[in-house]
Image: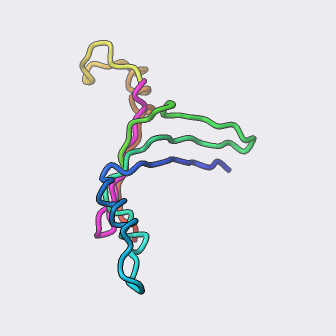
Amino acid sequence: MYRNLFSLSLAAGVAFVGAVLAGGPAGAQQPSLKERLVGTWTVVSQYTIAPDGKREEVYGAKPIGRLIFDAGGRFSYVLFNPERPKFASRDKNKGTAEEYAVAVQGGQAYFGTSR
């Protein structure tokens, strides 16, 4: 079984940190985890741990990515390896089979709901 891990940093940061650290009157209800996650997050790492303990960074040491959560329970996740090769022709419509394979393997994107 592989474990897929990623770390995030808050892109919408200052307001979030201020809201969490500010606290409030004694006995005030704290925001739920779902409410605290709402916003845009920047991926700072993503790696897989194999059963033998080996760490693999499929999207490179410094992937480019965003994870967005909205208040309605929807999310979007986009991740790319910034070191993936560019198309030699500079036109993705004129790529080779090998270039298309590398392009697909160098990124991922998905979206959905948390329900």
Residue 44: image quadrant is top left
Relative placement, left or right, of 75 versus 56 is left
Location of residue 108 in the rendering, given as x and y in whole percent from the top left corner: 41, 41
Furthest residue in direction top, as rendered: 88
Instruction: Choose between 79 and 89: the one closer to the eye.
Output: 79
Relative placement, left or right, of 36 versus 52 is left
Residue 27: image quadrant is bottom left
Q: How many marks?
A: 0
Location of residue 41 in the rendering, given as x and y in whole percent from the top left corner: 36, 51
Is residue 32 shown above or below 68? Answer: below
Residue 32: image quadrant is bottom left
Is residue 65 shown above or below 24? Answer: above
Furthest residue in direction right, as rendered: 52
Residue 17 drawn in magenta: no
Q: Residue at x 55, y 34 (%)?
A: 57
Indicate the quadrant containing the C terminus: top left, top right, bottom left or bottom right.
bottom left
Q: Residue at x 57, y 48 (%)?
A: 4
Magenta region: 67-83
Location of residue 85 in the rendering, given as x and y in whole percent from the top left corner: 40, 20
Location of residue 71 in the rendering, given as x and y in whole percent from the top left corner: 29, 68
Instruction: Choose between 31 and 107: the one closer to the eye.
Output: 31
Q: Residue at x 38, y 63 (%)?
A: 37
Q: Residue at x 31, y 58 (%)?
A: 39
